[in-house]
Amino acid sequence: MGSQGGFGQSKEFLDLVKSIGETRSKSEEDRIILREIETIKRRILEPDIPRRKMKEYIIRLVYVEMLGHDASFGYIHAVKMAHDENLLHKRTGYLAVTLFLNEDHDLIILIVNTIQKDLKSDNYLVVFSALNAVCRLINEETIPAVLPQVVELLGHQKEAVRKKAIMTLHRFYQKSPSTVSHLISNFRKKLSDNDSGVMGASLYPLFDLITIDVKSYKDLVASFIKLLKILGLLGNGDKHASGQMYNVVGDLIRKCDASSNIGNAVLYECICCVASIYPSTKLLEATAEVIAKFLKNDNHNLKYMGIDVLGRLIKLSPDVTEQHQLAVIDCLEDLDDTLKRKTFELLHKMTKSSNVEVIVDGMIDYMTSINDFHYKIEIASRCVELAEQFAPSNHWFILTMNRIFEHAGDIVDIKVAHNLMRLIAKGFGGDHESADSQLRSYAVESYLHIVTEPKLPSAFLQVICWVLGEFGTADGNYSASNISGKLRDVAEAYSSDETVKAYAITALTKIYAFEITSGRKMDILPECQSLFEELAASRSADLQQRAYEFRTVVHLEAHAVKSIMPFDVSCEDIEVDITLPFLNSYVQQSLQNGAQPYIPEEQRSGTIDISNISNQVSRESSMHALKFEAYELPKLPAPSRPPLPVSNISTELVPVPEQSYSIREANTYPSIPSVSTSGPPELKLRLEGIQKKWGRPSYSSSPPSSSGVSPSTASEISQVESAASLSSRPQDNYKDLKKAEVKIAPEKQKLAASLFGDSSKSNKTTGTRHNTSRSDTLSIDKSTGSRSSVAPCCRDENSSSTTS
Amino acid sequence: MIHFVLLVSRQGKVRLTKWYSPYSQKERTKVIRELTGLILTRGLKLCNFVEWRGYKVVYKRYASLYFCMCIDQDDNELEVLEIIHHYVETLDRYFGSVCELDLIFNFHKAYYILDELLLAGELQEPSKKIVARLIAGQDSLVEAAKEEANSISNIIAQATK
């Protein structure tokens, strides 16, 4: 305000202050002050003092007054100063006025007018000072003069003004209650004002008001409920804050009138608050009493609230529910749907291994009866959760899962299905072989019964097919033809659902494989034959592939089948040696025939890898994007010696056609020269003779003749190739098929491990990663290759990634 | 927050709807249909709260009218019951012993009163007195305007004769 030794202070003032500060005795101080007063008195009476000087004089007078001396001659000047237009002067004036005058002074009258005008002012600082003055100076008589403006200011934009206005009103109220009584609603409004300062401020007058007359303020409760909610949030987990709240909440609980609806609302909120803040035994006792009252009440609403609260308190004190068991059971059996749901929620929270069976059974029963989709999902997932967590016995678990799937299979997460599969495969951990096999046979049996039912959900069917395939013939109770007949029925019945069909087919394949492995000669049922014929020409690549796999497996001898499809290995990792030693002999042979040795990716030049753009960026910086050498003349693709060396830059030129005929030849190139197409080479269309419209410019090459393979018709090629290649390398297929299963298993293993805390989890996860990278290298490293044996590999990846 | 307010008669006729969350026209009819089906079939002694679609619907029956309000999962249901009662009391005060017929013929006034009470899905005015005063003020404005219109039209009518 300029009085802190800022600009414009005269030397005299500073001297004054300094000298007083230096005085050692009261009398000396008095002397100085009196001298000062004389000076000012003289000066002030001069006619034309500049405002600035006047301001200073007034400040000095304030100072003087502060030290205890009378300076009443200056009051009128202060009043005049408050009237000034300059904000600074005005503030000084107001300050002086508030300090000099009290409410009984005669000069108040002069001030009131000024204040009135200032309260209407646009400048909020002016309004501030006016309000301040009002607070100090107004007495009963003058209140009405100022009241309307102040009330108007309650709605001012600036929250500080609002806050001040409220405080002013509070002051008014303190002076004379009657004048302000009609403003009570304003106070309430301000309670829910946005700014917390205003809200806090309004609490003051309200507190006063309320202490007098509690009843009429019941509807303030709504805001109090919000307050309690805030308290609950603030105290959550914070011991210190909670400690401060205990008294308040305790009082509130005691005082709340439980007979009125709104009182109960407050009580409920209190309890919620208690539940969320750091616990205290006293409060918990109080809440327990309240809950008892709620639950015993006939009013359903209160019962509802009681159950809700029990659910919340269960974490803090589990035995609270013990006392109210009967009431809870009543609610469960009640006709009221809402109450039932709430009780189920409570039961869900208090499930332990001892009562899980009952609870889950009850929940499933209820679930079958409800139509509300949203709620059904919730309750189904809860059942699953509880079953997985607390299942007392395997049998019960299977049974429960079956029931859940039957009724809510489509809406339950697919992961649950996989989890179940994995569980059946692995058992409940430990080495209880007999228990596991019992579990499996039980599962198989139950599924065989269920599978004949119409309209089963897809996820469930998947589980059924898988289990039947894996373990159907394990215990020898059911003949392979029986099971395969059932599976075939499934595939027929659900012909629109491709996933289910895929599962069914693979299951059939497994069954036959196991039969062959165990030496039992068996004939494929004619229905199955026709099914596979049909599928071999299916639109879905996935189904086609599986059909072909089946066909080839069935024609293999027992030993090969055994290594492809060993029994009960769904949970095992595939060990794939990255160097592929089994291909070494083949590679040697090809090298002898003059094929190019494999050049690893890093050493290749002039190749662009579509799949690693990041590599590409770094590589392109080191080589030119444009070619400066002349193109090579096109070479006719010689049968055994395609002359294009890998290291030639011109491989850029014809990546596609080269690729297409190189991979068709059975005994050339151990490597696929350009990595660009190795990414998805298998998915490429046959582009011989077709000019590529984009990508690197390529000239069309004549369709290559594939010598190593006997190409009669296009459709035959893939099959014959597959047969040829498969016969020479059963291990490839082994890998292909295995990939399908292994892709599922580690996924499930991961999930189940997280639920069951399996220690082998880390192995499995790396296993998954390895598999994907290995399969990539597989596709790259495959020297031959009939495209279709490369293709199933990749398609397998795709399909299995979708199924898992 | 309150997502919507719905007043339905016992026969299933909608007397008042107010939406505080975005619902398309089709959704609205669907919601109304579902809720009327759900609530009208409930017995007398049952809970006043219904769980529906992940929300809670608090309803209260006054004579032949059902007052329903849809709230979030974590809201206090008893509080909303109180809000419904508050509304009904305000209506009662304004109309003087309100009955369904009053709401049918003066539905616009019912809307005015509801707007004074609830704003953006929250209770904004807990005092019945204030609301009554505001509505009375509004009414007097309407009266004054009407009179003015009458007088002017009279004048014009006379002037153009």
Image (spheres, rainbow, N blue to C red):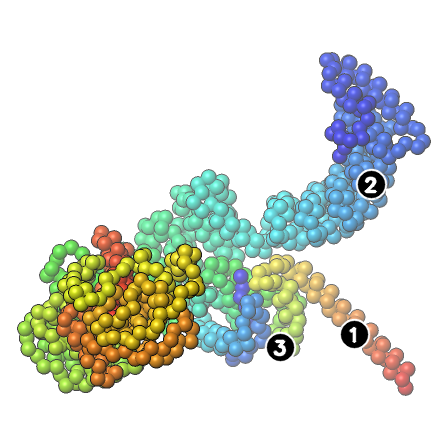
- Residue A293 showing in the rendered view: yes
Callout 1: helix, strand or loop?
helix
The quadrant of the image that shows the N terminus of chain A is top right
Q: Inspect the image, locate mark 1, and give the three-letter code of the amino acid beneath it.
A: Lys
Q: Quadrant of the C terminus of chain A?
A: bottom left
Contact, mark 2 vs mark 3 (Cβ under 8 Å): no
Amino acid of disc 2: Asn
Say above or below: A249 vs B6. Answer: above
Residue at (25% x, 58% y) in the render: A770
What percent of the width, then of the height, locates residue A306?
Answer: 41, 57
- In this figure, which residue is indicated by the disc labeled 3? B104
Q: Neighbour class for label 1 at 10 Å: few (<14), some, many (≥20)?
A: few
Relative to A412, say whether A209 is above or below: above
**In front of the other: A268 or B156:** B156
Marks 2 and 3, Cα distance to the nearest angstrom? 60 Å
**Which label sits in the foreground, 2 or 3?**
2
Displayed quadrant of residue A375: bottom left
State which quadrant residue A501 falls in. bottom left
**Chain label for disc 1:** B
In the image, what residue occupies the spot 59% across and 66% down?
B88
Q: Chain for mark 2? A: A
Residue closest to the eye, B102 or B72: B72
What residue is drawn where x is 19% and y is 75%? A708
Q: Which mark is residue A34?
A: none
Q: Assign a secondary structure to mark 2.
A: loop
Q: Which residue is mark 2?
A: A86
